[in-house]
Image (cartoon, rainbow, N blue to C red):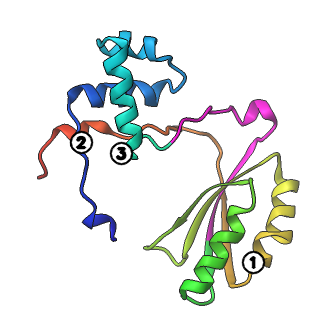
Amino acid sequence: MPASDKKLVKLDRMDRKILEQLQLRGDLTNQQLADTVGLSPSPCLRRVRALEEAGIIRHRVTVLDPKKLGLSLTAIILIGMDRHTPERFAAFEAAVASHPEVQECYLITGHEADYMLKVVVPDMDHYHHFLLNHLTRIKGVSGVHSSFVLRRVLDSTALPLSYLEQPAP
């Protein structure tokens, strides 16, 4: 079913407050979350479970600092494919998903590229090895254009929930 055919889940103001807090601090205990949003623990837990069951909360993660782990180089890579077939795209997507260096992979439009990747590695030598020994060896890759991040200006996983309160224009 296309994404536009999916029915959106109705969220009230309290659901949005819960989601905002969990996006900021996914490690909050139910008691801490309930205190923060102004609910008692039992209703808060019921709401969180309902949001999980609805698929709105997919999972919770711990965000690590890449530089403190020696992962100092972030590359944004545009990938061109030789053919635009479902099989070629599926094979490429499976191949990049097997590499932990690839943090994000998007099928895109608007560029002379088909995919955009975000790759994190320790340094340029590791990037060079990843590029030559893994990425360019994926069947169908016809072009690679790399850009390197000089500074992270904004790095967030939080979704803009304020749109849920406004009627469509």
Q: Is residue 92 shown left or right of residue 169?
A: right
* Crowd class of label 1 (few under 14; some 14 to 19; many from 20; radius 10 Å): some
Any mark on residue 138, and which?
A: 1
- Mark 1 lies on a secondary structure that is loop
What x and y, as percent, mark residue 74?
69, 49
Q: Are marks 3 and 2 in contact (CB under 8 Å)?
A: no
Label whose residue precedes the other's in the sequence (3 or 1): 3
Q: Quadrant of residue 60?
A: top right
- Mark 3 lies on a secondary structure that is loop
The amino acid beneath tag 1 is: Ile
Residue 107, above or below 161: below
The amino acid beneath tag 2 is: Tyr
Distance between mark 1 and mark 2 Cα atoms: 39 Å
What x and y, as percent, mark residue 11?
23, 37
- Residue beneath the point at 25% across and 47% down: 9
Distance between mark 3 and mark 2 Cα atoms: 19 Å
Q: Quadrant of residue 71?
A: top right
- Mark 2 lies on a secondary structure that is helix
What x and y, as percent, mark residue 141?
69, 81
**Closer to the camera: disc 3 or disc 2?**
3
Q: Is residue 32 shown left or right of residue 73?
A: left
Label whose residue precedes the other's in the sequence (3 or 2): 3
- Range of magenta residues: 59-78
Q: Are marks 1 and 2 in contact (CB under 8 Å)?
A: no
Q: Which residue is mark 2?
A: 163
- Residue beneath the point at 88% across and 55% down: 125
Any mark on residue 1, and which?
A: none
- Residue beneath the point at 81% across and 69% down: 134
The amino acid beneath tag 3 is: Ala
As for residue 55 lying within the magenta part, the answer is: no
As for residue 76 lying within the magenta part, the answer is: yes
Q: Which residue is mark 3?
A: 54
